[in-house]
Amino acid sequence: MKKLFLTLISILLFSNLYAQSPTLEESNRVKDVVINFLQWYKKNEAKLESVPILTGFNEDYTKKTDSVVKVDDRALGIYLNNLKKSNYLSSNFIGTIKSVYDSVGVSLKRKPLTNYFGPIPELEADLIFGFEPDETLNFINKIEFINIVIIAHKALVRFRILKHDHRIVALTKVENDWLIDYIGFDTDYYSLQGKRK
């Protein structure tokens, strides 16, 4: 994840020097992938995790006796396969999600959580959209693309929705299709806002 983040920063820093001016067609293809994925995710979100990935935690204030939180590897496989079926995500993107759950699974084996109520460490927010996925998913029609940089088979997209949700999406072109490698907050935008206050 750190490697991908450093790559993204490098692309942003050197984009003015080495970036190819993307053709209108290629820019539109990249935009379409971003929008189509957001729409696909919104439509399929409830069906993606058909079997709970995490089991054994208390979903309400009623304690379950002798419950131990754990990652269900079979359910994780189903979830990742459902994401893959979108045909918008790269194997890197799916691998990153898998590695987070694998890390959580290892942590839970080392230090089991029993009779637990609350967010699971490392999984406090949606792994794809963060704490408020609805701020992105409910306003897809308000998306405004700020910048698209294409270098060889890599693309970096900056967009915002209603001036409050600023995102960066990194994509890789694989066999003539653009696939999403990363979706995250535009930390440069948010850090600049913090400095202005």
Image (spheres, rainbow, N blue to C red):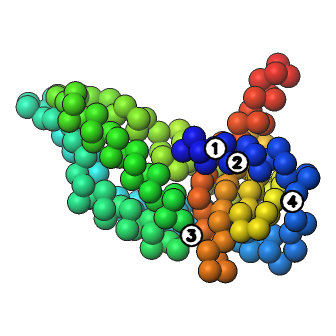
Residue 155, percent from left and from top: 73, 62
Determine the secondary structure under disc 2: helix
Could you tell me how far apart the alpha carbons at marks 1 and 4 are, in whole angstroms?
A: 18 Å
| Mark 2 surroundings within 10 Å by alpha-carbon count, few (fewer than 14), some (14 through 19), many (20 or more) | some
- The residue depicted at 50 percent of the width and 72 percent of the height is 86
Q: Is residue 90 left or right of residue 122?
A: right
Residue tagged by mark 1? 5
Question: Can residue 136 be seen by looking at this rendering?
Answer: yes
User: Which is more N-terminal, label 1 or label 3?
Assistant: 1
In contact (CB < 8 Å): disc 1 and disc 2: yes
Residue 96, percent from left and from top: 47, 51
Kind of residue at badge 4 = Ala
Could you tell me how far apart the alpha carbons at marks 4 and 2 are, in whole angstroms?
A: 13 Å
Residue tagged by mark 3? 88
Q: Is residue 133 left or right of residue 120?
A: right
Find residue 8 and name its label.
2
